[in-house]
Image (spheres, grey):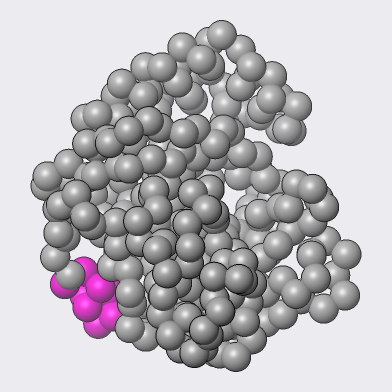
Amino acid sequence: MEDCSFPIFFAREIEHRNERIEINDGTYEIKNDPAYSYGSIIPNDTFTKIDNLSFDFLMSAKFENSKTNKNFIGVLNLNKIVISFFNIGIHTCKNIKQINDISKSNLFKMVIEKFTEDLNEFFDIDGEIQYLGLNFKSPNLKTSTFDRNLNLRIGLHLDSWDRKKLNDRENSRNRICINLGKEVRHFIFLNKKIIELIDDLEIDNFDLRGGSELGRLYLRKYPNQQITKLNIYPGEAYIAPTENIIHDATTLNKAFPDITLSLIGNFWVKKDLFR
């Protein structure tokens, strides 16, 4: 397994850890697919679980609990504070209309309000939380993120909610994404910081380029770079610096819709939550 810029941590109660991480052998550029925007790059569908030696190496990293540390990816079990989302039937939604109807309901607003309070059990939170809303994706998508203006999938990409310059992405807010569906979901990413892509490409005018385009430039030059797949069970969440890491999700081989709730903010993990 290649060197990782972002260590992966699991909360103490997370089970089956050695089955959670998979890697593949690289990426390819989409050609002539009407479902994708021009130039999209996606992972090869060659994911396999990492071996025990690689897993032990990943787990050897020590979590630094400080209010300057966002350079990690974590998996959390939030079942006890997200059970209300399941109780109001979000996981049973079969289309985007049903999701939208629930998200507009007073009951959903009440659940969100209580959930926001309960987050303090897991995180110290600086500033306001920005909810990105419920997200619904169909099964069997190679990658799931859409450009809503074009209604086309975009492949591996970089979030840019904070609009920070590419050499300042470590100071962006991090993201929590909760699996509210019926099945395991898959977070996929290139385990490198944006500043490392800039350095490897030797780009001087990187602030003039979009972050997602930077990722595409890098993956065109290095198509054999491994992509990591992290498996998130229902009721669990990942926390990740998605404005500093090229990423997406995949719903390949799924029978049910992928349903998530995402929020961004300055989330600092409580002491001793990981391992």
Height in image: 247 above or below 126? below
Write down the quadrant of residue 7 in the picture.
bottom left
Write down the quadrant of residue 26 in the picture.
bottom right
Height in image: 42 above or below 96? below
Residue 271 counted in the magenta span: no
| Region rendered in magenta | 52-60
Q: Quadrant of the C terminus?
A: bottom left
Position of residue 132 in the picture relative to residue 273 (left or right): right
Q: Position of residue 133 (x, y in %)?
A: 56, 33
Residue 20 shows in the view: no
Height in image: 119 above or below 244? above
Residue under the point 62% across and 28% down: 92
Closer to us: 235 or 239: 239
Q: Position of residue 16 (x, y in %)?
A: 31, 57
Q: Position of residue 11 (x, y in %)?
A: 23, 49
Q: Report how many numbered discs are placed on residues in the image.
A: 0
Position of residue 122 in the picture relative to residue 34 (left or right): left
**Which secondary structure type mostly characterizes the magenta part of the structure?**
helix
Residue under the point 16% across and 72% down: 60
